[in-house]
Image: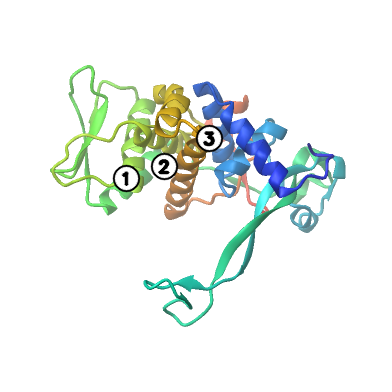
Amino acid sequence: MGRMNVSAEVLHTVLTQEVRKANSGAEWARWLDTAAQFPTYGFGNAVLINLQMPQANFIAAAPGWERLGRRVVKSGAIKILAPVRSRVLFEDKDGELTMDPQGSIRQGIIGFKVANVWDVAHTVGPRTALSPTPLPPTIDGLWESLIRDAYAKGYTIDVGPRTAEIDGYTDHRARQIIISNQLDTLSVIGRLAHEVGHLRMHSAAPGEARACRGLAEIEADSFAHIALAHYGRSTRMPSFEEVMSRAVSEEPRSPESVIKAVGTRAVIAARRFLESTGHQVAPPLGMASRGISQDTDRLVRYSGPEL
């Protein structure tokens, strides 16, 4: 696809066809891994990047590479969808076009166009153009960020003895996240990330004690997967095997639209979480899930351009 001139409509079709083929949890996890590696890009573009260059490490548009002193090799372009923005009016409660409450005409997305980005492997120039900034030395930073996020929403954390079949849940009556202490450390962090994902994406009645199920469960698992992957860790999420079946049950004629919506909500929520922690979301050079060392002390982050 990199050497072809394609329209936005064609690229949308390619994206839809790729999403429609999703038939395994491993495939869903790969898309989320790409979203974790490149969190400034949306879910749809994560799918397109993974389709065209699953081994990509660091991507940027040509002007960004030029600012870093590198030149792109044109034949290596990865095609993504970039929003087209323009000043737009909005409808008021009576359906009349109007300006926003501040009296100005805001920028809105009016469509999409095809844009090219390149992986570092398809650029030439000095290696020193990429300035490394170390990741937090351990995954403890993610645990602490998740706790602060839960506290900010008025929830406390209780890690203690639980029955074998319950890993964790959120008690909205007591405003408490309950996690079993029978899990290993990584699973405890993943479970807390899952519950924080629910808090960020889903509402619950005050009397409810247990977490959501169905698509909401997949979204929370996806949020947790992205958060862990961004720190170079991963954990098994059984709900990923249900993505297509749940989407078909929700919308039999267009399951891909449900899958896109689920992925988009999880990616946006994870990006906002990372940004709220003060964690820079520029893409890291490599990820543990792609064969890089599991030692997060050795992972490095590179601040660089984005589309």
Q: Could you give the CA–CA distance between mark 2 and mark 1, rounded to whole angstroms?
A: 24 Å
Q: Position of residue 156 (x, y in %)?
A: 21, 44
Q: Is residue 112 left or right of residue 154?
A: right
For the residue marked with disc 3, what is the amino acid?
A: Glu
Is residue 288 visible in the rendered image? The answer is: no
Q: Which residue is mark 2?
A: 141
Closer to us: 30 or 90: 90
Please name the residue shown 13% across and 43% down the image. 207
Q: Report the mark closest to the observer, 2 or 1.
A: 1
Image quarter of the N terminus: top right
For the residue marked with disc 1, what is the amino acid?
A: His
Q: Is residue 282 left or right of residue 182?
A: right
Please name the residue shown 56% across and 71% down the image. 88
Q: Could you give the CA–CA distance between mark 3 and mark 2, rounded to whole angstroms?
A: 35 Å
Is residue 28 visible in the rendered image? The answer is: yes
Q: Which residue is mark 3?
A: 256
